[in-house]
Image: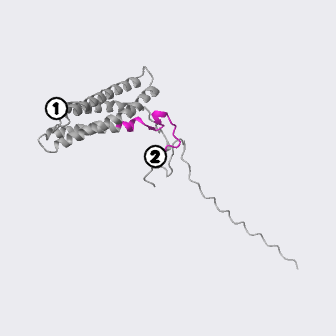
């Protein structure tokens, strides 16, 4: 039995396109959020290392690395926020728990973005030549990282508790033992073409007796 299946996960053929929301089974917002989330967590780690080793020659390198992580994450967050807003607008209805949860997620992540932008400004204007991460910059980074964790947890509830933008497989053939892949848009996997059986040889005709 085969052990790997790449094509169904990578293909866009057969998936319905939803504009800024992405494709059925391939929404754009979740993967875009991975970039700022990872960047903000790395920035927090680098700042802690820099502050702890403030007397070391490498502490400034970690401070600068954290600063660039914050800048890169902030740039990527623009696309994440845009796709997230479109999800909120098109995929949730007012008055529902799903909309309220999406509101909480959006408010948390907007607050993160404000903290990050303030942190970048503080670093660039006041502390760029510092030998290690100053206390104010560290506090802003840690606050942003903590709220990022909270916002990601709320966003995870939307996806994994409520099934938001999830194209569920239910009792799909993908969970049945099979050698054939189910591609996007298919209800049943395409059966591999079978070679046509060779025609059976016709039985020999009986010979007619000869008359003398």
> Of the numbered discs in the image, which one, if any, rests on residue 117?
none
Which residues are the magenta region?
8-33
The answer to whether residue 180 is left or right of residue 52 is right
In the rendered image, the residue lying farthest to the right is 212
Question: Can residue 188 be seen at all in this image of the molecule?
Answer: yes
Quickly name the residue at label 2.
10
Residue 28 drawn in magenta: yes
Q: Residue at x 85, y 77 (%)?
A: 210
Cα separation, mark 1 vs mark 2, equals 45 Å
Quadrant in the picture for residue 62? top left
Of 113 and 4, which appears nearest the observer? Answer: 113
Mark 1–mark 2 contact, CB under 8 Å? no
List the single residue furthest toward the top.
Answer: 95
Mark 1 neighbour density, 10 Å: few (under 14) some (14–19) many (20 or more): few
Question: Dot 2: within a 10 Å radius of its alpha carbon, few (fewer than 14), some, or many (20 or more) residues?
Answer: few
In the image, is 51 to the left or to the right of 178? left
- Reply above or below: 178 against 113: below
Q: Residue at x 46, y 27 (%)?
A: 90
Residue 71 coordinates in the image, percent (x, y):
29, 36
Q: Quadrant of residue 104?
A: top left
Q: Nearer the viewer, mark 1 or mark 2?
A: 1
Q: Which quadrant holds residue 80?
A: top left
Q: Nearer the viewer, residue 204 or 80?
A: 80
Q: Is residue 162 visible?
A: no
Q: Position of residue 116 (x, y in %)?
A: 27, 31
**Residue at the bottom extreme, as displayed:** 212
Where residue 201 appears, x then y in whole percent? 69, 66
Name the residue carrying label 1: 135
List x then y, in percent, for residue 199: 68, 62
């Amino acid at each position: 039995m085969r052990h790997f299946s790449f094509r169904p996960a990578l293909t866009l053929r057969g998936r319905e396109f939803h504009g800024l929301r992405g494709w059925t089974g391939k929404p754009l917002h979740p993967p875009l959020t991975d970039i700022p989330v990872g960047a903000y967590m790395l920035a927090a780690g680098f700042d802690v290392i820099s502050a702890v080793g403030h007397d070391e020659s490498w502490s400034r390198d970690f401070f600068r690395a954290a600063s660039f992580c914050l800048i890169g994450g902030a740039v990527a967050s623009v696309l994440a926020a845009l796709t997230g807003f479109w999800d909120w607008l098109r995929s949730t209805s007012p008055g529902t728990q799903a909309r309220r949860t999406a509101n909480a997620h959006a408010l948390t992540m907007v607050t993160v973005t404000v903290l990050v932008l303030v942190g970048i400004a503080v670093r660039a204007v006041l502390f760029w030549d510092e030998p290690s991460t100053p206390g104010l910059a560290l506090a802003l980074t840690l606050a942003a990282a903590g709220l990022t964790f909270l916002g990601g947890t709320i966003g995870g509830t939307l996806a994994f508790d409520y099934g938001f933008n999830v194209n569920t497989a239910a009792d799909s053939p993908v969970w049945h033992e099979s050698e054939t892949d189910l591609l996007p848009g298919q209800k049943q996997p395409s059966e591999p073409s079978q070679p046509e059986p060779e025609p059976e040889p016709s039985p020999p005709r009986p010979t007619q007796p000869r008359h003398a």
